[in-house]
Amino acid sequence: MDNLKELNGARTLVTGGAGFIGSHIVDGLIEQDAEVIVLDDMSNGDLKNIARWEDNKRLKLIKGDIRNQETVRNAIRDVEYLFHQAARVSVPYSVRNPHLVLEVNVMGTTVLLEESRKADVEKIVVASSSSVYGDTPTLPKVETMCTNPISPYGVSKLAQEQLGKAFHETYNMNITSLRYFNVYGPRQRGGSYAGVISIFFKKAFENQALPIFGDGTSTRDFTYVEDVVQANLLAAAKPVSKGRIYNVARGEQTSIDGLTDEIIRLSSSKSKKEYLASRPGDIHDSLADLTLICRELGYDPKYGISEGLRKTFNWISNELQL
C-alpha cells in the first residue's frame, strides 16, 4: 500500500504478532519502515509467520501473556502505536471455553489499555469482530446498528470495544476498533478452530468430506488478510479515526455452498459436501456496509473472493509441498 509517513520510523507493538492476522500487520509495518515489537504467548502464534524478519533489527519478539501487567508494561515502554490482535479466537472455541475466552479477551485488553494509558501510547487499534452484530436479519451491517452478540466470543469482542470507548471518553485516549468480517488468507492454518476456508482447503487436499453446518445457504463477507492490514495501517495513521468503530470487509456476500464449490474446483479435489446440523452461536448471513471506513480512511479493499482464494490456495499448496 502507499507510504504512510506517520508510521515511518515509528515504534509499534503488535500483540498476537506471530499469529495469522498479526504477522501480516507486522509485515506491513516493517515495510513502512516502522520498528515492531511482537508480544505473543504463542498459543496461536507460529514463529514461521515472522521468520522472514528473523535477522531484521526492526523486529523484537517478546514471548508473554497480555494478562500479565509486568510483561505488558515492559513491552509497551516508549511505544507510539499499539495494534491489539491477541485473543482467543473463534465462535466454536468460545462456546466450549467461555471462561478462558472472556478472561483473555476482556481482562487482557483491560491490562493493555491501562498500561497504554500510563505509557502515553499515541494510538491504539483494537481488533474487534462482526460477531458483535449477532444474527440480526438486517443487511448490510452498519456500525450504528444495535449490537446483539450470541456467542461468548462475540460478547468478548463487544466488551473490548466498550472498554476502548470508555478509555477514550474517560482519558481522551486515541483508540479505534475494527470489526473484522471473516478474515482468511495465507498463514491461517487448518486447525479445529481455524476459519472455514483454511479448514476446507486442508480437507479438500486430503479428499475428505467438507462439513457444512446448515443447508449451505448461509453467507459470509469473506475478507482477504491484506485488506485487513490496509485497514489497520490507515486507522493508525489517520487522525479522524480517533474514537471510531469501523467495519473491515470486502463488502460482498458468498454462500458457503458457493465457497465449497470453488475450493473443490481450485484444489481438483474429490471431496463431497457433508451437511450437518447448525452449530450453536453461528449466524446465518453476514455482509458489511463499508461506507464509513471508505469515506473517512480511504479504505479500498483490493481482493475479491476468487483472487483471495487463489492466493490462499497457492500458499497452502506450498506449505504442504504439493
Image (tube, rainbow, N blue to C red):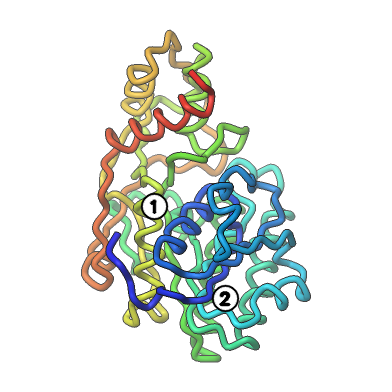
Q: Quadrant of residue 31?
A: bottom left
Image quadrant for the N terminus? bottom left
> How many neighbours does mark 1 have within 10 angstroms: few (below 14), some (14-19), or many (20 or more)?
some
What residue is shown at x 75% (from left), y 71% (from top)? 71
Lateral position of residue 314 relative to residue 62, left or right? left
Percent of width and height locating residue 203: 52, 20
Amino acid type, label 2: Leu
Percent of width and height locating residue 76: 64, 76
What residue is shown at x 67% (from left), y 58% (from top)? 40
Residue to which mark 1 is pinned? 136
- Does dot 2 land on a helix, a strand or a loop? helix
Camera-nearest residue between 296 and 106: 296
Residue 163 tag number: 2
Camera-nearest residue between 137 and 9: 9
Between the C-alphas of marks 2 and 1, the distance is 23 Å
Amino acid type, label 1: Thr
Image vertical order of residue 59 relative to residue 214, above or below: below
